[in-house]
Amino acid sequence: MNEPKAMKATTYREAVKEAIREAMHRDQRVFLMGEDVGHYGGCYAVSKGLLAEFGPERIRDTPLCESGFVGAGIGAALGGMRPIVEVMTVNFSLLALDQIVNTAATLLHMSGGQFNVPLVIRMATGAGKQLAAQHAHSFEGWYAHIPGLRVLSPATLEDARGMLWTALEDPDPVLIFENNTLYNMEGTLAADAGPVDIEKARVRRPGRDITLITYSASLFKCLEAAEVLAGEGIEAEVIDLRSLRPLDDATYLTSIAKTHRVLIVDEGWRSGGLAAEISARIMERAFYDLDLPVERLCSAEVPIPYARHMEAAALPRVDSIVATIRRMMSHG
Amino acid sequence: MGEFRMPSLGADMETGTLVEWLVMPGQPVQRGDIVALVETQKGLFEIEAFEDGIMGEPLIQAGQTVPVGTVLAMISSGTEAAARMDVQAEPTAAAESPVEGPTVPQTAAPLTDLPGRIACSPSARRLALELGVDLATVRGTGPGGAIQRSDIEEAAKAKESGAAPVVATEKPVAAAPIQPMDAATSAARMRQAIAAAVSRSNREIPHYYLETEIDLSRPLQWLAAENQKRSIQERVLPVALLLKAVAKALRDVPELNGYWLEDGLQVKAEIHIGFAVALRQGGLISPALHQVDKLSIGELMQAMADLIERTRVGRLRGSEVTDATVSVTNLGDRGVKTVYGVIYPPQVALVGFGRIAERPWAEGGMLGVRPCVTATLAADHRATDGHQGALFLEALNRHLQLPEEL
């Protein structure tokens, strides 16, 4: 098994498209619907070409009504289909919040286990493209609060390619958050890349001095920061959460037992956010492993600004991650 | 005026190290308040005050190792303290205040100001214990001068390279030579303590053993139904039922609950069950669950979880390591079928439980499969005979078959 695998150059966007295409071929019950996914090819061009390949029955354009088409997706899932619903951005998903939180997440429980909802909803999330405050927020931490949902955050090409099929096999609703700054990311992917697990966090870079816990686009900022710090003799271990609900506690707790220091990097806001939850879990489960207080680097608590320099200043950046870790490590 | 002394936390304890004072001189304390941390061969313990009063100046400083019974500080009653405060208010008389003079059994260490709680990261605090480093001697380089792991490692290295041991002692008669304890010696010391206790047990106690098989279908069914009603945090494990049934059976056969001391059996009215907890670094401690017969199943479960957690992080109260009147060893989760226990002196009985497993069970001419557990009793033949032992196991079974009354 030491043969080098055949690799091919691709992008995050292509990886997501390949995942949808594979699912459509593997299971006739799978179909894609959302705003502009058909004729326009998707707001982020993810579904470009799929209408021609699969036809309007399976690649369905919907009216601009999130509450309506997410509800239709729930109904289709209850009726035996395996819908992939695309919500253009997480900001618009607030219009479908009742369908997602109050219906999809609860039906299994409300029906005493009789009706599960095998629905997958894909959404773009995140800032960085000067789309301003109504199109640039990161609400995945909110959804991670809701029992009954599984919340995934693919950062790498492998995960963009592999999480969808595993999510479709889950009998319950799964939300997949694709950071809009990642679609153009280029890289190589094994020619035979396929489904991946959606349970475990991954150590993306091993290190001994400090644990960086992050997910989605912030992963690459953390990896770059770790590279800079390695030049100064600081070895950061970078953990990609991958699943925001349920959280894989074991992976980061194991890392903290080794490094004794933690920085959580989260593009969501700090107050009441996912980073706060992870921090609390560390206090509960790894207090005696800590050599420094847990720290968080999150987005500034403002609506994400439009102006480029202000938007950049509001988000976690490589230089702010490096500076925070330098300060944390300056005490020996 | 009362004396606060180094307590005996078990028959095998000869000396203890005062790790940290948790109250400052002049601070009021109440009976039961935790006032100091003491380290023994068995770990770190929180020590309670036994009377109300005002904490006096410490006679023993953090880091000193002293024999059991040594006065650590005086606790003065409220009125005395008030009087003393008045005296101190007079600038000329302050220095000669004789209040605690005559009862002090040894030269007191210099009465420097006790620092407040030392700022130290949780991980460094644990490392200091493992490496035998006294926090009071370490200079912190962390944020705000907090002590970090690197500071402890430095201090340990300095000690190893031949610097004078930081543990000071005024008492040349201290039983054991005082050395800084590293993790390996600490583990070895615990092994020695266990060895002393079990050797004494095997030497002195004529054990007899009884064993019985108990059908757990009814209690486990009841427990499953009961757990349905509880939140996940409040769920009860079968071991809580077993412990509660032991406590109730001991009420029926009280001769098994007590101590053999000075050639006689002292039956104890309160049922404190020592519950063996294996430690991650090796060795074991059997801290006491207090008054188990009076706890509800839910309370017992919580008390157990709390006790196990605190045992593993080394935060037991002194009373919890000395109070057990009987012991229970449960090796079921390790897959063991039958436990033949060694009694912890001066107790007179140890109840053992093996794994709960489905076994063939003949009853009323029919063969069925039932979840069963093997319960054993190791008892001191000086204190009881097989007859009482048999009555106990019978009572244990009877109580387990009436789980709703547990």
Image: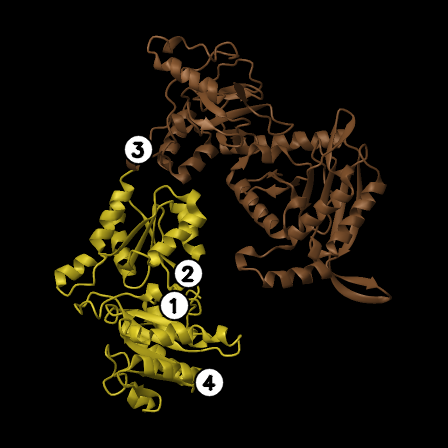
| Residue at mark 1 to residue at mark 3: CA–CA distance | 41 Å
In the image: residue B322, left or right of residue B81:
right
> Is there CB contact under 8 Å for labels 3 and 4?
no
Asked which quadrant contains residue A95, the reply is bottom left
| Residue at mark 3 to residue at mark 4: CA–CA distance | 63 Å
| Residue at mark 2 to residue at mark 4: CA–CA distance | 29 Å
Task: Measuring from the top left, give residue B44's x and y in whole percent.
Answer: 52, 33
> Is there CB contact under 8 Å for labels 1 and 3?
no
Residue identified by numbered label 3 = B145
- Give me the chain that's brown: B
Colour that chain A carries in the picture: yellow
Task: Measuring from the top left, give residue B368's x and y in whole percent.
Answer: 78, 66
SS of the residue at dot 1?
Answer: strand
| Residue at mark 2 to residue at mark 3: CA–CA distance | 34 Å
> Is there CB contact under 8 Å for labels 1 and 4?
no
Residue A80: numbered disc: 4
In the image: residue A217, left or right of residue A163:
left
SS of the residue at dot 4?
Answer: loop
Residue identified by numbered label 1 = A151
